[in-house]
């Protein structure tokens, strides 16, 4: 509608493909070095398919490569293991090691399991 009835309001719903957030910590405080490693994994700068990435500095001064892995569940994207291999290789060329890596949030399988558990519990009530 062109005019929203204040008594009713408006609701918008959107959806996007599930994204895997994958972070890789580097043993470096060198921003330029972290940027070079990040560029190796980012699709836009020649890295593998379906990877958005940026380097972020922690309070400690060490850097991480923060990745959004797109399309990993369709098979068209890059998995965390594949992204890690690219990052480790680029970091090694720079003389730096990966100190830690982890995903943020739930995987698709974990979401499906939580849904199934909730439906099973609702059926018991």
Image: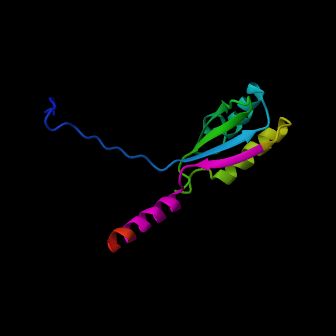
Residue displayed at 52% across by 47% down: 19
Q: Quadrant of residue 56?
A: top right
Locate residue 12 relative to residue 47 in the image: left or right. left
Locate residue 69 relative to residue 11 in the image: left or right. right
Locate residue 8 relative to residue 14 in the image: left or right. left
Q: Residue furthest right?
A: 95
Locate residue 92 relative to residue 109 in the image: left or right. right
Residue displayed at 46% across by 62% down: 114
**Where the N terminus falls, by quadrant?**
top left
Give the residues in magenta: 99-120
Residues 51 and 44: in front is 51
Q: How is the image coloured?
A: rainbow
Residue 125: image location, x then y, percent: 32, 71
Residues 51 and 6: in front is 6
Residue displayed at 74% across by 35% down: 37
Q: Residue furthest front?
A: 125
Residue 36: image location, x then y, percent: 74, 31
Residue displayed at 31% across by 44% down: 13
Residues 109 and 46: in front is 109
Residue 10: image location, x then y, percent: 22, 37
Residue 89: image location, x then y, percent: 79, 44
Q: Quadrant of residue 46?
A: top right
Q: Residue furthest bottom?
A: 124
Asked if residue 116 is positioned above or below residue 89 in the image, the reply reads below
């Amino acid at each position: 509608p062109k005019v929203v009835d204040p008594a009713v309001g408006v609701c918008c719903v959107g959806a996007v493909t599930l994204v895997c957030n994958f972070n890789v910590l580097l043993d470096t405080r060198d921003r330029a070095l972290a940027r070079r490693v990040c560029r190796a994994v980012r699709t836009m700068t020649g890295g593998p398919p379906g990877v958005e990435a940026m380097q972020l500095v922690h309070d400690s001064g060490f850097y991480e490569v923060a990745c959004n892995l797109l399309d990993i569940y369709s098979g068209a994207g890059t998995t965390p293991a594949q992204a890690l291999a690219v990052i480790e290789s680029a970091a090694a060329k720079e003389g730096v090691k990966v100190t830690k890596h982890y995903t943020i949030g739930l995987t698709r399988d974990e979401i499906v399991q939580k849904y199934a558990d909730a439906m099973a519990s609702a059926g018991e009530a």
